[in-house]
Structures are given as C-alpha cells and as structure tokens.
Amino acid sequence: MVKKSAAETAWIAQTARTLGFDLCGVAAAQDFPELQKLNDWLDRGYAGEMKYLHDPRRADLQAAMGGVKSAIVCAINYNSPEPYSTEVTHETGSEPRGWISRYAWGSDYHEVLWEKLNALVAEMRKKFPEPFEARASADTGPVQERVLAKYAGLGWIRKNTLLLNQKMGSWLFLGTILTNLELTETVKNKDSLQPDLCGSCTRCIEACPTDALVNPYVMDARRCIAYLTIELRGPIPEEFREASGRHVFGCDICQDVCPWNRKSPRTDVEEFQPRKVGAGESLFNPRLEWLLNLTEEQYREAFRGSAMKRAKWRAILRNACSAGGNAGLNRRTEHGEKIYAALEKLAAGEDEIVAESAHWALRSKNAIE
C-alpha cells in the first residue's frame, strides 16, 4: 500500500474530533522501548491476579495484529464537574458514603469508545477505497494504549503510570485502532514527543495511601486500591483495608492531587455524568447504607451498562464492608445504627469473603459501640 500523506493523517484526526474524541494521533507500529519492560514488571509479580496482562501479544504489536503498520490512538476527556475525592469532606455524624472512581460514574466507557472507534473506521473506509484491515479496541485488546498514545503525541506517561496531556490533564479514556494502512506519523521523531513535565513533583507517589507507586513510573498493582477493589477476587489483605478508606470501586487520589489536573477541562458529555440508580441514588459519593443492602438483583439493575459490573456483586459488598469499617461509625446515631444492622446481616451471611469483611468492619477500631 502507498503510504498515506500527512494531510490524510490530519483528516483522520479531524474526523475523530468530529465524532467526539478530544485527541487523536498516529504512531508507526514498532518495538517501543516501554513494551520491552513489560516482562520484567510481570516477573516481579506486580500484576497480581490479572492473568490477562501476561498475554505475550501485549509486548509485540505484530503478534497483536499480523501486518500492522500503524496505530491510531484516540482519547476523550471524562472529567465531569463534580468535586475530586480529595475535595469531598465528611463531618462527624453525617451519613456515611463510599467513593466510586470517576471513570465509572456514567455509562460503560468501553461501549462509548467502541461505538466511536467503529464509526471512525467506517469513515476511513469511505475515504480510502483500497481494502485494508483495522482492529479497534477500547481498553479490551492486547495492546498497551498508554505507550501507543505517547508515541502518537497525545502526552507523556507520568509518575503514576497514567498518560498525561499538558492541556487535557489525565482524565482520559484511550481507544486504539491497529491497521495495516501505512499512515504518516503524527510525531516525526522521538525528540518531538511531548516532554515529561512531571519534573521533581512526587505528589501522586506521596498521596497513595497504600504505597502502590513503589518507584516513579512503577506501580505494584497488588497494592493499588483500584486493583484491590476491582480485580482482586478474594479478601482484601488486612494490611490495606484501613488505608483503603471509603473506596468502594477504584481510586482517583493519584489523579486528584496532580497539579496538571487543577485546570483539566470539565466535560459535559452525557454518558460520563454520574448516573442515577435506585431511588434517586447517584454513583457520585453514594450512601454506604444503600451499597451494603444491595441484593444481587438490585446490583444487576443498578449497574447494567456500567463499568462497575466488572467488580461483581460480592466484591461491591466486600468493599462496602471495608468502607463501613473506616467510616467512624457511631451506633448511637441513626445512620450508624443502620450501617451496623447491614454489616451484622452480611456477617451472618453465607458468602465467606463478604462475611469476613463485615466482621472486620464491626470490630474496626474506628467503630463506636
């Protein structure tokens, strides 16, 4: 195939923006240095139970798609207007609430990105008449999106391992299209990549409650609250429960404290706004009482079409128990009594992991009888 011109790459980026993406760039498929570091990271056991990260295709784009020549990387901002987790305070006696990561407040981002990526491929097929292969993925394929995004000129990989764009911040969903079209790269050489502007700042590392960022640019996922509350299927290790605070699904702290995110633009995209569930409940800072009393049927209804369904019902209850144990409960208050009652019911239940978590919460040093 004839290599596409810079103007045609610019057309792809403009079409992506028309479809709702905020950023789009193209990188030539190659053996990026970061891809070769994956095996060392895996050998250290940092992936925990995430077996899918051991897929060898993640370190080799040609294995991910035979004949791939280019990677198109698109990003969309999901930073809705609500306060950051570090800005939300809880007064003594107020109704206990649990934190859900910002990315999971709205519709399942996989589906939102997948639809837009497929629409971009459809427009490309109209623009380029010759037959070509294109494989789109939205955090689902065996590719390292952040690495591809870096070399497509979308930003740099910051010390907490996430992609950061100087203007957009780090609240970015990433989607990729691998293709055998030979496209002109957005960035001509490595010297033209967005520079690492983290400088001497280590706020993300210092703010992590569980010390998951073992070194700048290196995360031990086994210590990360997001891993512990979403990917881990067994009990949360006791050494991390108190540090996990009121987190019920994921964690935003390392992004919340980043200076570059102070001026991150807010999105009005409807799919990324906090959804309403149940009887007027919102996924922004929801009540722990509601979470602890969720039946499996209510869970399926509330989180249909939500990224939260990845954690499964029992994990949400397990996490809510830990959050309850950290809530400073006072049984002599109305709210405290309701949380105690929910925890006692779960402690007597048949699920061993949930029951153990509930027992831990009931004997937590933060609880007041």
Image (cartoon, grey):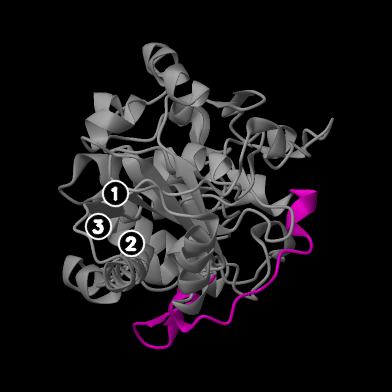
As rendered, which of 343 and 115 lies closer to the eye?
115
Tell whether position 53 is magenta.
Answer: no
Question: What element does badge 3 sit on?
Answer: helix
Going by the numbered disc 2, the residue's amino acid type is His
Instruction: Look at label 3 and name its amino acid.
Output: Trp
The residue that disc 2 covers is 110
Q: Earlier in the sequence, mark 2 or mark 3?
A: 2
Residue occupying image coordinates x 21% and y 52%: 133
Residue appearing at x 61%, y 54% in the figure: 328
Question: In the drawing, does residue 326 fall left or right of residue 234?
Answer: right
Q: CA distance from mark 2 to mark 3?
A: 20 Å
Q: State the residue position of label 3.
A: 313
> Magenta span has 266?
yes
Q: Of all residues shown, which one is farthest toward the bottom?
A: 280
Q: Do the numbered discs 2 and 1 sit on residues whose CB atoms are within 8 Å?
A: yes
Tell me the element at label 2: helix
| Residue 318 locus on image (x, y percent) | 34, 48
Query: Does the rendering let one see residue 55?
Result: no
